[in-house]
Image (cartoon, coloured by chain):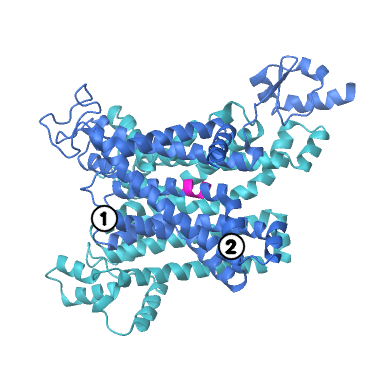
Amino acid sequence: MKSGFFAGIANIWRNLPGKAKVGVWLFGFFVLAAVIGPEVAPYAPGAQTPLTQAAPSAQHWFGTTQTGQDVLSQVLTGIRLTLELALLVGVIVTVISVLVGVSSAYLGGVWDDVLSLITNVFLVIPALPLLIVLLGYLSDQGQTSTIVVLSLLGWPWGARVIRAQTLTIRGRDFIAASRETGEKTWRIIGFEVIPNEVSLIAASFVNTVLYAIGASVALAFVGLTNVTTWSLGTILYWAQNDSALQGGAWWWFVPAGLAVALIGTSLVLLNSGIDELGSPRLRATRGTARVAGHRIWPTDPTPVLAQLEAEPGRLGSFLHSFSRASVLQETSAGGNR
Amino acid sequence: MSYLIRRLAFYLVAAWVAITLNFFIPRAVPGNPAEIILSKYPDLTPSAYKALSQMIGGALQKGSLWSQYLHYWDNVFHFNFGTDLNQFPTPVSQILDQAIPWTLILVGTATVIAFALGTGLGILAGWRQGGALDRSLPVLMFFQAAPYFYVALLLVDFFAIQHHWLPAAQGFNGEVTSPGWTWSFISDALEHSILPAFTIVLTSVAGWMLQMRNVMITTISEDYVIAAQAKGLSNRRVVFTYAARNALLPQLQGFGLALGFVVSGALIMEIVFSYPGIGYLLLESVTNKDFPLMQAIFLVITFAVLVANLVVDLIIVFFDPRARAREAA
């Protein structure tokens, strides 16, 4: 059983597109940083040293802030809080979207109408202004209120996608078969429907984590959080607050922002990989074949050698295909040969 | 017609939800927002006190919840969003009037540019799948994954602080010119809008491009595209009049849904640039606990997104025979 499981993982890994593999490595690197970061950080993130606003050096790899705090230590500590929040929101939101999506599709009738309407309404109402308004009222604005508010507003996308998928799975024969054999509804949902949606649920989880990182960092950046804790967003908040940019201290805001951007990129790569796994048509083809020294695209008509000889090289033929001359050439080619 | 009526009904429901949320949020949060505010203004005049309690409600407002709710609707219909607390006694609607044009012009123009550019690049990337443009997508994804405000900060650092090519903040230079239909003001405002607009385009173009590329790839393998190629039509005609035209409709539908994200990004962008629009105003109102203004801004943004969605729906019905067929059915 165990070896089968690992073999399965290895098999998925082999089939994963290159883009997704890069995403997995990149994201794994940041998870590692979140786990061991605060322990290996050379200084306490809030500790002030006499060396203020110093450029990167051997002593402070990422330089120091206006009050002499070590930027590297802040980033290493901040990654943990940001990732913790994002993964937690990801789990909560995924659970809610599976619950809403599956029950909406499975119960049908009035339930479906009501749940779908709620889902669509919350999709069309812009989330960030609502987030800002809610956090504006919640006066404590700690990590918890951010998690609650992000979770409350994050589920509609996933719910909608999962509902659509459940509807198609529900109509399949094997579901009808298990209903005929007298399986209970909850068992069909838990053991037949949901296992067939794993890749979709995974994609929606990854998307949610991406949304949670973006939103929480943005909210922290504008100061709508407890700014005395260390997260990637609050580092940027303090950098902005103390005019790091105007003072030329680029090292203060570049590392934290770069970390957010790289985590985001890794998730986007991961997701496009999952997408391609599910729909092979999107998979990047090897691109082109070469026939008689000419590049042939998958979308090109079957090559005719006589025509190929007359055409120019790679970029030239691409640009040429949009030109007036190509129209003339094609019509005359049809007439002469 | 029934399709359009159903869409219209949906947007009305969405508007009702937004307004109702706006009414209940201040009443549902723990603590009393009214008291928080009142403690900030110990020497309020009686009329100010009344205006405040009317807008914030809670324990201070008289009458049952239901009558408060009706009264609130009455105010919304008359565009009466109460009195601003920070610049008392200026009405909130007057402050909004000053901010809305800035956001509308900047964000509107930049979004349309980003959409057109991204769609065009997506057509090319999808047609030449695996080509140079297609393989450059991960780089663009980086700009999309980077937070809006971070890209804005980097641009400010490079263009404004290190090289002094463009202004770093504000919508216009108040020392040189003042708002009005004068050339000096318009040129100054244009100069100030280049960096914010560039930020919006740079960060959102990859999203449109990726979506259009994916739709193009599925469209290209449709039979009618192959038939068009078999007829011997030029690539340009096949791409633009056969494949792209049909791929454009899902893209338009995505435009409506993604608008919320675009507006959200633009809000944060305005905060970085201290641009005198709605987003900057929203942050100011939140930090000042200026609740009437904050709630009014939320409603304005939501309505703008709803109206834009309705317009997109109308365009789709107008251009897509399939949607018209659904409508007739």
Q: Tag 1, which secondary structure?
A: loop
Q: Nearer the viewer, residue A242 or B163?
A: A242
In the drawing, what numbered circle is on residue A187?
2
Chain drawn in blue: A
Q: CA distance from mark 1 to mark 2?
A: 39 Å
Counting from the top left corner in percent of width and height, residue B214 is at 61, 41
B152 above or below A121?
A: above
Q: Tag 2, which secondary structure?
A: helix
Residue B118 visible in the displayed image? no
Does the magenta segment cover residue B254? no
Counting from the top left corner in percent of width and height, residue A328 is at 79, 26
Magenta span: chief secondary structure: helix
What's the residue type where badge 1 is placed?
A: Gly
The reply to whether dot 1 and dot 2 touch (C-beta < 8 Å) is no
Q: What's the residue at 23%, 78% (across, down)?
A: B60
Q: What's the residue at 58%, 52% (across, down)?
A: A195
> Chain B, which colour?
cyan
What's the residue type where badge 2 is placed?
A: Arg
Residue identifier under label 1: A142
Instruction: Name the image quarter holding residue B163.
Output: top left
